[in-house]
Image (cartoon, grey):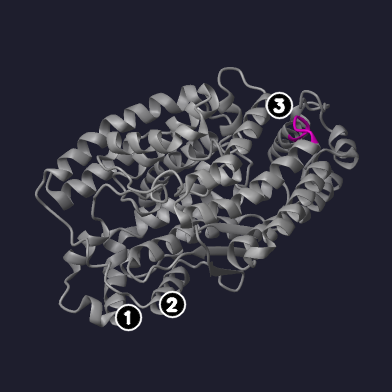
Amino acid sequence: MKTIENLQNLIVVMQETQHITSAISLLSWDQECYMPKGGGRARATQLSYLKGLEHESRTGRKMQTSLSECVDLETGTLLTPASEWDERAQALLRETWRDYYHATRLPSDFVRTLGLETSLAHQVWIDARKQNNFSLFAPNLKRIVALKKQEADYLGYTDSPYDALMDEYEPGMTVAHITPLFEALKSKLLPLVAKIGQSGVSADDELFRKFYDPQRQWDFGLKVLSVMHFDLENGRQDHSVHPFTASFHPTDVRLTTRVDPHDFLSSLFSSIHEGGHGLYEQGLSQEYYGTPLGTAISLGIHESQSRLWENSVGRSRAFWTYFFPKLCAVFPENLKGIDFETCYRAINGVRPSLIRVESDEVTYNLHIMLRFEIERMIIEDDLPVEDLPDIWNEKMEAYLGIRPETNADGVLQDVHWSGGAFGYFPTYTLGNLYAAQFFNQAEKEVTGLSEKISAGDLLPLKTWLNEKIHRWGRQYSSQDLLARVCGEALNPSYFTNYLETKFGELYQV
């Protein structure tokens, strides 16, 4: 039987391409963390060139020659019976052809143009957000929307052009699948939000909005990452406007967060969230770096790792049983006279928020549904870019009962559109659903998991995730992996039951 050892020539070609991809990622990370503002246009040109080079490497003669030895380049069909290949080799060929096929649908000039536009737009978005000036960003966004519609046409689709864009982030997911899933989730979330709002129970919203020394916030976040077993010898954390994770190799994974002196929870949970992403990247195969077997399955599965650590662990009673005394020791003046229950309730307070990344577990997915609906209106119905602020504000009021007073707190708050990431937002809610189901399974299989977390022993959970999820790369689809780990298909009831149980206790509803 043929194994992955028979595919070394193909692996070398893919790893050469990955070197370019990693260089692009490094320049993008620097653009958001350290690059001087004046370098924006030069950086955009550099990234545009490299993205074109990356695309040509993915589709060029060396890739065609190596891949065509095993599969039909037009159909992806194996040239020899599948029974002659082992499972990992089949997966590598299947996913490599998928990437090749998608890349060949996009002309190199288009890839360069999109890369240039998104790199320039990122700098404009930063300025527009600072100045609360949507009209400054609108021309860039118009050009990006036109390019993303063109991209959908190049890639092809059956029902909706949005399907083609979403498939880039969550392979196989469609509007037809997502829409009823979101509607069912919304039918559970809106009544729960209403019950909590009418409960008469409140959290101390101001507890974590006092002045918290930024350096001590930073150091505490690094301590939490260390306890999570994020390897700071093979990773680091830096500042950025919008928290994100960049990985150039499992031995070089970069996290970022933002520190607000008057919003301690924002910085901490950004670190934990990005730490979850980072653990996934560090847990991928070094041997198969640059190949589908050394790459994350989907952004939904990736988001499941960040949300599992941020919420299932980081906002849990067990986690704070260990970390509350340590937090009090770091910020004695802020937490003097504050008991555990007050702190725990403040950490898990439910209050509709204008800002997605600062929203609570109960209302968070309403932010995603809003964006999903607006993106469909843009891509499917040609909603004019100029109308976005008003549409955004109307939906915020309808779903969350609050209306942004500024575009900086509304339509300009997310970085994603400046990068052309249409179809990305649904993966956040999918990540929440996957996370709840994975964590439920971990509780069954890791003996005494809650007690271990209470004692600050997070290694058993990290090891379980490494074994069950991270090490497989893209050998299995997201749905196949979920079934393999949990023994069943995606089941949103794990997530809604979790919310109803946790917040039912906290708010006595």
State the image quarter where residue 398 is shown.
top left
The image position of residue 453, as x and y in percent, is 34, 64
Q: Which residue lies under the disc numbered 3?
A: 154
Q: Main secondary structure of the magenta part?
A: loop
Residue at 26 percent of width and 56 percent of height: 348
Which residue is outermost to the top? Answer: 158
Q: Earlier in the sequence, mark 2 or mark 1?
A: 2
Give residue 298's position: percent from left, percent from top.
57, 42
The residue identified by callout 2 is 219
Q: Secondary structure at mark 3?
A: helix
Front: mark 3 or 2: 3
Q: Residue at x 18, y 39 (%)?
A: 194
Q: Neighbour class for label 2 at 10 Å: few (<14), some, many (≥20)?
A: few
Please tell me which residue lies in front, 473 or 347.
347
Magenta stretch contains residue 21 = no
What is the three-letter code of the residue carrying label 2?
Answer: Asp
Rendering coords of residue 160 (x, y %): 56, 21
Seen in the picture, residue 214 relative to 473 is either above or below; the reply is below
Q: Which mark is residue 330?
A: 1
